[in-house]
Image (tube, grey):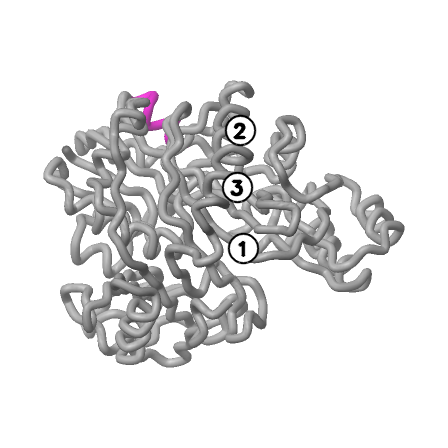
Amino acid sequence: MNILVVGGGGREHALVRKLLQSEKTGKLYCIPGNAGIANEAICPRSDLKTTDMKQIVAFAVENKIDFAVVAPDDPLVLGMVDAFQEKGIPAFGPNKLAAAIEGSKVFSKGLMKKYGIPTAKYNAFTDMREAERHIRDSGTYPVVIKADGLALGKGVVIAEDFTSAKAAIRSMMEEKIFGESGSEIVVEEFLEGPEVTVLAFCDGKTIVPMASSMDHKRAFDGNLGPNTGGMGVIAPNPHYTPEIANLCMKTIFLPTVEAMSRENRPFKGCLYFGLILTPDGPKVIEYNCRFGDPEAQAVLALLDTDLLEIMLAVTGEKLNTLTVKWKDGAAACIVAASGGYPGKYRVGHAISGLKPDGQLDGALVHHAGTKHTGDGFVTSAGRVLGVTAQAKTLQEALDEAYKAIGKIRFEGMFYRTDIGKY
């Protein structure tokens, strides 16, 4: 089969590597891809953005693509899966209606409220002053403020007082730091407890959870600094016991799938559950409509079943006929980032220590933000590389990942040294 993966980050590099392991995979294309992906797949249009829907779909038609994988949130929310399907190309990922579960916080919170899926109490606002008045009158801190739409994983602020809450609201609604994504906001109660990410394959009726994981969003050690797209991941999550998994299946996973079907938005693809284990039980912090990044790098390292077979079962609504198997042990991914990220940073710095085969001391190096020059790899984004190791124990996986990342160098490079401790 000729396959096209849409995207160009570390998540897509992990997906490409896994798809290449399938005997059914023929030519594998990636648009736009990155320098690391280009070592393993064909990246014919690095000039395109993932939102250049017409051109990407036209490429798929011209190159007789048999199957597409749409990985990032933006093209999913815009309806790229629908566009592929209109051309007779099956695609892994939710259609536009189902992708609203991530594309709109207001929609997803309303869905949970309507169908009794446990989540934080909330209010939605389109008027900035009403939102400020609500927070001032409630007087309860910390308070969580979220932009309604997509914001590169950075549209959430935990405000400790009214001054910081007001600043967050104004930055979203008045200054438009997230564009139209901040035209409507959600203000919700702050929940405490360990956080868990569970990715799940879903074909609209059947749901198959993957290995759980623990993301580390804060930029610096000690869970300090601003939120990022993710600085590291471990899988499985030590807080996620079999008992909690069973409870989540009954109270969150199955009810979500059923709710989406009842709303005539059956979800087919990878459904991301961001959970928090509160004293009152597990609750949903957020949904995403795709693989997390860097969660995918760690979770896919543990997958022992042909990923393409799973994706074909999802699109064909035959997931219930497949047994998805997982490797024993654990995996860890450590992200190497550009100095200044998630704020301003410079690109174009030469990267040393990488090997052509993408492996380093038993770990896999996934490229997230790299370009290739005549002299080798250079940085091209805030998150540059993700070093992933899989081993019998979590500590062994962490040790291997840290040993490997310690051999990589580029100007301004930084990474957290405490992944797995929080």
Give the residues drawn in magenta, as a range: 80-87
Going from N to C along the chain, the mark reached first, 2 or 1, is: 1
Q: Nearer the viewer, residue 85 or 163?
A: 163
Query: What is the spatial separation of the Cα atoms under label 3 and label 2, in whole angstroms?
Result: 13 Å
Image position of 356 (left or right of 220): left
Image position of 390 (left or right of 282): left
Going from N to C along the chain, the mark reached first, 3 or 2, is: 2
Q: Determine if residue 49 is in view.
A: yes
Q: In which quarter of the image is residue 346?
A: bottom left
- Which residue type carries mark 2? Pro
In contact (CB < 8 Å): disc 1 and disc 3: no
Query: What is the spatial separation of the Cα atoms under label 2 and label 1, in whole angstroms?
Result: 20 Å
106 is within the stretch colored magenta: no
Label ID, residue 255: 2
Residue 47 point in image, percent of width and height: 31, 50
Instruction: Name the residue at 73% across, 51% down.
Output: 174
Q: Nearer the viewer, mark 1 or mark 3?
A: 1
Residue 204 point in image, percent of width and height: 41, 25
Instruction: Name the residue at 55% across, 20% down.
Output: 263
Label ID, residue 287: 3
